[in-house]
Image (cartoon, grey):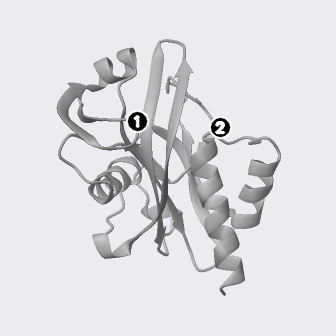
Amino acid sequence: MEEYFDVLTREGDYTGKIESREKCHKEGLWHKAVAVFIMNSKNQVLLQKRSANKKLWPNLWDMTAGGHVLAGEFGFQSIIREIKEEIGINVDKSDILFIGASISDTVKGEIKNRHYNEYYIVNKEIGISELKLQTEEVSDAKWFDMNDVIKRIDDNYNGITEKIGCWNYFKKYCEWKENNS
């Protein structure tokens, strides 16, 4: 099933146009993407391992869930949908904390990813046995110590995706959390 996205300006403003995922990535049209990190009370973050068949960053650890914002959706709606699709967990709008946004402009092969990214945190206690992984997207999921993830970021994204903005916002949130606990 073809996905359709709201086309944005580089600044993140709506243009009133809607285009297919394929056209957005082929022509480098700006559109929205979201990323969410689920954290628990033990200062752990739930990461997913990307499936081997993913075009970008296969077999690397990544944020808990994320993806594109579909035409007509807001970022928080995409977060709720993506968490349910990718790991089978339900969250409500009240569970979601917006922590920032950035743009990214990357080209990998034929894919021109021009995203207005939104970043979110969900604080939730979840057992790994509760997860229902979407196998075409996710091959594994596990809890990582927050400080271990920060070390991976600082070690040139060791074993994790090179989604710089995403990890920088996560790191900034962790610093804030440490200073305000």
Q: Cβ–Cβ below 8 Å for labels 2 and 1?
A: no
Say above or below: 181 vs 60. Answer: below
Q: Residues within 10 Å of mark 1 (few under 14, many from 20)?
A: some
To which residue does mark 2 refer? 162
Position of residue 146 measured from the top left corner of the image (x, y, whole percent): 70, 65
Identity of the amino acid at label 2? Answer: Glu
Q: CA distance from mark 2 to mark 1?
A: 21 Å
89 on left or right of 65: left
Reply above or below: 31 against 170: above
Q: Which numbered dot is residue 122?
A: none
Q: Residue furthest top?
A: 110
Q: Is residue 139 left or right of residue 26?
A: right
Q: Which residue corresponds to mark 1?
A: 10
What kind of residue is marked 1?
Answer: Arg
Q: Quadrant of the N terminus?
A: top left
Rendered location of residue 55, percent (x, y) = 50, 23
